[in-house]
Amino acid sequence: MSRRYFGTDGIRGQSNIFPMTPDLAMRVGIAVGTIFRRGHHRHRVVIGKDTRLSGYMLENALVAGFTAAGLDVFLLGPIPTPAVAMLTRSLRADIGVMISASHNPFADNGIKLFGPDGYKLSDEIEQQIEDLLDKDIYAQLAPAKEIGRAKRVDGDIYRYIEFVKRTLPRDVTLHGLRIAIDCANGAAYKVAPAALWELGAEVITIGNEPNGTNINLDCGSTHPSALQKKVHEVRADIGIALDGDADRVIIVDENGAIVDGDQLMAVIAETWANDQTLKGSGIVATVMSNLGLERFLNGKGLSLARTKVGDRYVVEYMRQHDYNVGGEQSGHIVLSDFGTTGDGTIAALQILACVKRTGKTVSEICHRFDPVPQLLRNVRISGGKPLEDKTVKQAIADAESELAKNGRLVIRPSGTEPLIRVMAEGDDRGQIERIVNDLVGVIGSARGAAA
């Protein structure tokens, strides 16, 4: 069933334009509150946000909806997405909410929802929410004497910092390391530098002056050039780039080279396998992860299970098949021994533990395989279904046949933007470039598409 509101990671869109309006946010609060209002105890919801200007508006609208549905609200303020997931469980809340559009520009925003177990909601529950949103939602309001209360809580940010610190192995400290960290002017601008410093590192922080409109602006994991420059400038041992809500991470080594999520998963998988703590005899990643990662893992006797794009699908597979390492090339790293969703800071600590234990440089540790040439291009669409066009289907089939023996082709609609993503990889870079460029041209010329 097609869905009107939810994408691959909650509800997301441009602020003050449907669906990211205060009216819908309030309705979401009522709908979610209605579904999770079970039993006769006082129900509670925790709400965190990143540093976008529109966060104030959506936060207040959600509070109105949840309290109208009879839930008490704990407002956490700016805090990473994984902290919301953790605190949902720690505070025994019935629901957790993160107001964020992750790595998107400041004008966008989103609503991510977590169940009482700290995991993102299933497709089935999201469909229940959608069904309620399209009905007379005000029939679900609580009686006057059962209206909820709201309060702002400040100390729980330190609960999360302590939680993060405990994920570093006990025999490891960060003394002697100079770490540059880019917080993307986002949700982790307080907690991540504090955790690293308290663990003993010398910390140089950039992207820690949010003003409501500069989140992810030429900084963070999607724009790591500022961090690369800072690593060179201060001669840091490592650079850590988080995104706006800190659920993903990209590393910069001491030479300024970028290390993506695939390499980070390779490091963690091999390290945990050697320590005999890796579960599932491998890891879980998406169809976008590089073929080089799969070949590396196979060479170590480990497997790579692939899911469709979206860290929630990675987590679902991990839970179903008992894996404890998974993630995405973009830097979502899910370590289920520690949390229920991607956590950029915790993933970075696992890399830092490896650096300290081996005495090797980041460049030595984080280059576990040579990536297979991979090219990703986007085609912006303006409506219609270009992937159902006969010419497009034939072009895709021809490309898949050509790559069958020495590469992969992945074509999919974006779950968060009006884009078709075209990705191909293989051993022959020239072949990959030709195939992607040809497909982008065909898709772009199809009805309802604009290249």
Image (spheres, rainbow, N blue to C red):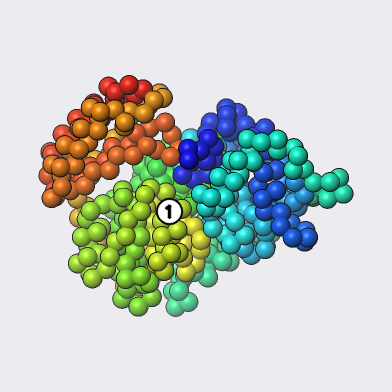
Residue 386, can we see it?
A: yes
Q: In this view of the protein, which residue sits in the foreground, 402 or 261?
A: 402
For numbered disc 1, what is the local secondary structure?
Answer: helix
Residue pictured at 23% horizontal, 53% vertical: 291
Count of numbered circles on the image: 1
Residue 263 lies left or right of residue 405; in this view the side is right
Q: Is residue 235 above or below residue 16?
A: below
Residue at the extreme front of the image, as rendered: 1
Residue 249, can we see it?
A: no
Residue pictured at 42% horizontal, 49% vertical: 310
Give neighbour class at mark 1: few <14, some 14-19, many 20+ (Cα, 10 Å): many
From the top left corner, tell me how far across and down residue 207 is, in percent: 49, 44
Q: Is residue 199 above or below residue 434?
A: below
Q: In this view of the protein, which residue sits in the foreground, 391 or 228?
A: 391
Residue 398 lies left or right of residue 447; in this view the side is left
Q: Amino acid at mark 1?
A: Tyr
Q: Is residue 95 above or below residue 415?
A: below
Q: Residue 229's image quarter? A: top left
Q: In this view of the protein, which residue sits in the foreground, 227 or 411?
A: 411
Residue pictured at 59% horizontal, 40% vertical: 130
Which residue bears the numbered disc 1? Answer: 313
Placement of the C terminus among the 4 image quadrants:
top left
From the top left corner, tell me how far across and down residue 341 is, in percent: 49, 57
